[in-house]
Amino acid sequence: MRINFWNRLGSLKNQLLAVLSFAILIASGQAYSQDKWSAEPITLPNAPDAGFYKDDYYIGNLDARVVIIEYASLTCPHCANFHVNFLPSLKKDFVDTGKVLFVFRDFPLDEYAFQATMIAQCAPRDSYFAILDQLFTNQQTWVRAENISDALDGFAKNIGIDSEKLTSCYADEKIIDRTVYLYTEAYNKYGVRGTPSLVINGQLKSGFRTYEELQGFLNTLLK
């Protein structure tokens, strides 16, 4: 069941083929099944163009003036760097102070990234960001395992997801459909082509080489 997501997209060897497969599926009207998951947008009071959804995973204040949506792949080392070296300062300076709402969305670059996000989304919702932190902090351990899928199964067991629940998790069409939808939207609506990508108040922003550069940009928005 783990490869269900990739079967939905076609036979993928790399990200370029993934994008091409999405284009074909979108054109044929088969990119996702809204019988299983449907997007429920919510207009936030102070950031109406943010593109926020009811079931988004987020931290921070829904009344914030700035909404950052991060698109990331759990196997991406640059994404791990962002979460380990950028996010703690971003959270302290902007999220915890109510200035920024931070949203995480998956943009999996391979089947292992998707397997990892299925595990994260099957855990209790209030554990989601703690699980992301564990996956990113220990990324170089599990991505270098002799059998990555088995390593992720072991991770799931360690966080309390038993074999029966894990089997159900890997077959969860709602997670699969949601990920396909959000991936497709990221590519077509925002122009996301790699990870990590930040969409800030509905606009794709890139080129933040340091936290200080991101901090300066956010301070400008918040003036």
Image (tube, grey):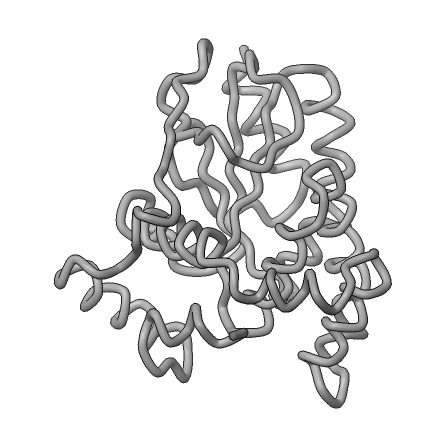
List x then y, in percent, for residue 94.
68, 23
Using the image, determine if residue 151 lies above or below residue 78: below
In the figure, is residue 175 to the left or right of 7?
right
List x then y, in percent, for residue 172.
51, 59
Residue projecting furthest to the bottom: 146
Residue projecting furthest to the right: 158
Q: Nearer the viewer, residue 156 or 71?
A: 156
Q: Nearer the viewer, residue 147 or 2?
A: 2
Quadrant housing residue 167? bottom right
Q: Residue at x 79, y 67 (%)?
A: 155
Using the image, determine if residue 10 lies above or below residue 205: below
Quadrant housing residue 203? top left
List x then y, in percent, for residue 217.
54, 29
Q: Residue at x 45, y 60 (%)?
A: 194
Q: Residue at x 52, y 46 (%)?
A: 105
Q: Residue at x 76, y 48 (%)?
A: 85
Residue projecting furthest to the front: 164
In the figure, is residue 117 to the left or right of 195?
right
Q: Nearer the viewer, residue 145 or 66?
A: 145
Using the image, determine if residue 56 lies above or below residue 23: above
List x then y, in percent, for residue 76.
61, 65
Picture quarter with the C terminus: top right
